[in-house]
Amino acid sequence: MAVGAGRLAGATSRKLRLGGGTTFPGDVARAVDPQVLGKLTSSVRGGVVLVTGTNGKTTTAALLRTLAEGQGLSVGGNPSGSNLIYGLTAAALRLADVSGKVELDWLILEVDELSAPRAVAEIRPSGLVILNAFRDQLDRSFEIDQVAQRLQEAVLGLPPGAFWVGNADDPRVASFDSGSSPRGISKILFGLNDESVGHKLLPAVVDSRSCPRCRSELEFSLVYYAHCGLYRCPHCGLRRPNPDVGADSIRMIGLDAIEMEVVGPAGWRAAISVPLGGVVNAANVAAAMAAAAAMGVDQSRAATSLGRFRPSFGRSQLASWRGASFRLMLAKNPAGLEENLTAVLTLDKSPVLAIALNDGVADGRDISWIWDVDMERLGRAPDLRVVVSGTRARELALRLGYAGVSADRITVRPLPEDALSAVSDLAQTGVPVPCLLTYTAMLAWHNLLVRSGSGAPFFQAP
């Protein structure tokens, strides 16, 4: 009954164009049977892997699905990004047959970090991937301590025999306890091993300076992004552990590709080229490779598989509008915007940049975090034009003004269609314009691009 009611709700929602059916079917099905998610996912042959953390969930889950598919495995997930418990249920419903069986080898789901403990309890996954713990949606998650606490609860809730993959470069994540040893939980750490892509100084956005063991201030000898890097505690001796799966020889080809080597614990080594940009995505690739190895995926096919990878909805996704090219990049919190700005200013050649700031429920009502980001770098780029958009466009323009961006370089266009037109007028032929967008702004821009024929609806994301 739950499966039938949920599937009918999804089909009706899409037919009436009320939405993509990425959440509502889960509401309906759970109203009929609150245990429907666990029942559905228990039929997956290989098991379920959950991917969580503040940033990078959608991309890493998509990378992991690509690696598994390259092995010839049947794989499903929630690529639209609906990652609360109702969205996970809707994704499982969409993949189930009429009897409620999910006939797949693996189900790889991204899950919201605050929802991770509940998802682990209901699904009892075979694996869990934790990417990072950053500030995000402060009106909902408060501070990073709560995010880290929920992620630790998820690890402790894993069933016996499961594995979890964590970020060695993030001091909070690397220090999570797997619980008592008789549970047989495997801990696998990934990280970056190429110091040439790091820097010596902490960036403006640092969410975690304190030691997770003794609360003393950590010392960083190298930082890759945000508070992720090489660290040690001078008081208790905690230090960044050596990752089991490491990314080395990293080379950025603009925002279009990363070339790297990934080295694993059994001596395997894979040369990877993937059409993504930025240091954070090198870490996402390492995380996906670590999880794939734990799933038994043959690493020798990784290069071929990831060469066919296409960025997920709104994550460095390319689109066009009135002859201009755009690169949609989600930037929903301080760490995300900081790292996207770093990538754009060091790797990109576009003469114009777009930033859209919304304050919807899905974005977080509190936008004060824009004052924590090093926007002053835009003030030091005198030839760069900036188009600002979104429901809080004027506050963003004010922030840029204080950052030293002159008024003649700022174009304020709150409405998405007006902003796209302004960017099109300023764009250079053949050079995609980076568009840094909060979540609901990204949905609005993407919907306009879909209506113009550039791309598929978000619920049909690859």
Image (spheres, helix red, strand yellow):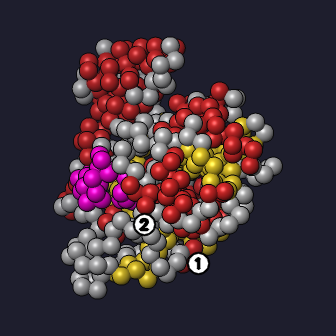
Res 41 seen here: no
Quote the CA–CA distance across marks 1 and 2: 20 Å
- Amino acid type at circle 1 is Ser
Task: Identify the residue under disc 1.
Answer: 196
Asked if residue 47 is positioned above or below residue 132 in the image, the reply reads above
Q: Quadrant of residue 134?
A: bottom left
Task: Please provide percent x and percent y for residue 177.
Answer: 24, 63
Counting from the top left corner in percent of width and height, residue 112 is at: 36, 45
Residue 282 image point, x, y percent: 55, 62
Q: Secondary structure at mark 1?
A: helix
Q: Is residue 144 above or below residue 206?
A: above
Question: Is residue 152 on the magenta stretch?
Answer: yes
Residue tagged 2: 205
Nearest the viewer among 246 and 375 is 375
Say if the magenta span includes residue 133.
yes
Dot 1: within a 10 Å radius of its alpha carbon, few (fewer than 14), some, or many (20 or more) residues?
Answer: few
Crowding near the residue tagged with mark 2, few <14, some 14–19, many ≥20 C-alpha atoms within 10 Å: many
Instruction: In the displayed orientation, state which residue is furthest to the front.
Output: 407
Residue at (64, 37) in percent of width and height = 418
* Foreground pick, 172 / 265: 172
Left or right, 168 with respect to 414, comes to left
Quadrant of the image containing the N terminus: top left
| Type of amino acid under label 2 | Val
Where residue 243 appears, as percent x and y from the top left, is: 43, 71
Q: Which residues are magenta?
A: 131-154
Q: Is residue 405 rendered to the left or right of residue 289?
A: right
Disc 2 is placed on an element classified as loop
**Residue drawn at 29 percent across, 68 percent down:** 175
Q: Is residue 27 above or below residue 298?
A: above
User: In the image, is 282 to the left or to the right of 45?
Assistant: right
Closer to us: mark 1 or mark 2? 2
Q: Image point 52% across, 42% down: which residue? A: 390
